Image (tube, grey):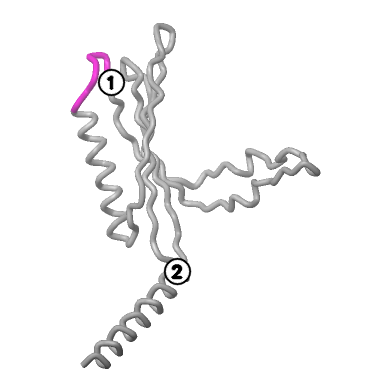
């Protein structure tokens, strides 16, 4: 009986090891979806849900500096920009009457719809991160609420 238990344990460890090696070799693609929601009073800002339809290789726009080579990155901004992206209109948090909770609920429904579609296409939501640049005082009437949804899926 002990011998059978040892064989089963050894077999289980072998399968776990093979599975671990297989999953560590799998390649993933990452997708970032960004929502930018205006928090400018009187509803004057623009709010959007943005998703790129093109890829960029960061290596083309990256340089390494060392003590011996301190030259700056000379890549062109125009080469980084892309024109092929998806833009979904969102509503601003404010209008002339103040904060609009209906607008927030509508934005939530649109973002949920986008994320539900992505999940149905095999994407997994890994991280969500958000930040706010808000009113900094009497002379600053600018502000945005930005959220990044970071998704991954296995390459097919």
| The C terminus, quarter of image | bottom left
Residue 112's place in the image compared with 39, above or below, is below
Residue 85's place in the image compared with 102, above or below, is below
The magenta stretch spans residue 98: yes
Which residue is at a point 32% across and 61% down the rendered structure image? 121
* Number of the front mark, 1 or 2: 2
Instruction: Locate residue 44: give its quadrant.
Output: top left
- Residue 135 position, x and y percent, is 38, 16
Nearest the viewer among 106 and 64 is 64
Nearest the viewer among 64 and 44 is 64
Residue 89's place in the image compared with 15, above or below, is above
- Check disc 2 and report the residue beneath it: 24
Of the numbered discs 1 and 2, the one sitting upstream in the chain is 2
Q: Is residue 69 left or right of residue 115?
A: right
**Which portion, as a residue range, is magenta?**
95-101
Q: Is residue 32 left or right of residue 112?
A: right
- Residue 23 position, x and y percent, is 41, 70
């Amino acid at each position: 009986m002990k011998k059978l238990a040892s064989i089963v344990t050894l077999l289980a460890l072998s399968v776990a090891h093979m599975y671990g090696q297989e999953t560590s070799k799998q390649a993933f693609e990452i997708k970032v979806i960004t929502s930018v929601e205006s928090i400018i009073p009187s509803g004057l800002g623009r709010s959007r849900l943005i998703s790129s339809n093109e890829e960029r290789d960061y290596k083309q726009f990256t340089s390494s500096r060392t003590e011996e080579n301190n030259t700056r990155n000379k890549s062109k901004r125009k080469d980084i920009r892309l024109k092929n992206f998806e833009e979904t209109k969102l509503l601003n948090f404010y209008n002339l009457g103040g904060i609009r909770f209906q607008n927030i609920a509508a934005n939530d429904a649109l973002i949920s719809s986008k994320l539900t579609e992505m999940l149905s296409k095999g994407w997994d939501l890994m991280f969500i991160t958000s930040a706010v640049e808000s009113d900094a005082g009497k002379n600053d009437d600018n502000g945005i609420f930005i959220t990044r949804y970071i998704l991954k899926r296995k390459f097919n």
